[in-house]
Amino acid sequence: MYNKLKTLLKLNDSPEWIALSFSIGIFVGFTPLYGLHTLSAILLFTLFRFNKLAILIGSTFNLPWIAPFIYFAGYYLGEQIWLASPFFAHHQLFEKADFIRFFSSWGQFKTIFYPTHFLKIFLPTLLGTTLLGIAAGGMSYFLLKASVIRYRRLKEIRRYHIEHQYKSGLTKPLTDSDQTVIQSDFHDIAIPFDNSE
């Protein structure tokens, strides 16, 4: 995950477009179409020219060990909204007794995937995960945009400092362990120098 975030910071695109592409990917990853997230992301960046890497990375953040929690939360949220809304028929949802019956045996569990049963789970889950996806995508947009802007700003400060050192008569190249503390607009930041870039 760290490498994915590092890749996002180094993408050659505007911070706004990188952040928007990533947030759309996050939203896609929240949809209950598990297994189709990558295909959905490919379709979206093909149609709307989003940043390909950013949207693909975003769509893969719903990892297999996280997905059950997201979908359970999505179903619960969707169910509560469904029950509170006068626009949805309450009989379209399962009762608690139905869930107990589904998990009583393998034969009963397979009936969940019957079209009429499946929709009673899928529709409230789709409603809930859509709202969760919008919230997560919105937060990821602002966080990533700020991170990309800050990363590029620090990179410019580092480049300026290196050039200033050489102009001041520094003849020995800086090594990976060389560090300097630069006064930014916010606070002192220790920046490691890496000559590989």
Image (cartoon, grey):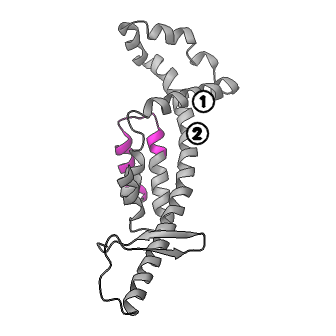
Indicate whether 45 appears above or below 82.
below
State the image coordinates of residue 179 (x, y, percent, origin top left). Answer: 41, 73
Cβ atoms under marks 1 and 2 closer than 8 Å: yes
Q: Nearer the viewer, residue 60 or 185?
A: 185
Judging depth in this view, the residue of 183 and 160 nearest the camera is: 183
In the displayed structure, 54 sits above or below 96; it is below
Asked if the magenta segment contains residue 43, the reply would be: yes
| 197 relative to 31, above or below | below
The one nearer the camera, 37 or 196, is 196
Counting every numbered tag in the picture gives 2
Going by the numbered disc 1, the residue's amino acid type is: Leu
Percent coordinates x, y for residue 185 in the rendering? 60, 74
Element at badge 2?
helix
Q: Amino acid at mark 2?
A: Leu
The residue wearing badge 2 is 131
- Callout 1: 10 Å neighbours few (<14), some, many (20+)? some
The one nearer the camera, 84 or 4, is: 4
Cα distance, mark 1 to mark 2? 9 Å
Measuring 66% from the left and 23% from the top, which residue is drawn there?
83
Magenta highlight on residue 26:
no
Q: Horizontal and vertical percent for residue 181? A: 49, 74
Image position of 4 (left or right of 99): left
> Dot 2: within a 10 Å radius of its alpha carbon, few (fewer than 14), some, or many (20 or more) residues?
some
Mark positioned earlier in the residue sequence (1 or 2): 1
Quadrant in which the C terminus appears? bottom left
What range is drawn magenta here?
Answer: 27-48
Picture quadrant where residue 9 is located: bottom left
Q: Position of residue 173 (x, y in %)?
A: 30, 82
Q: Disc 1 designates what residue? A: 77
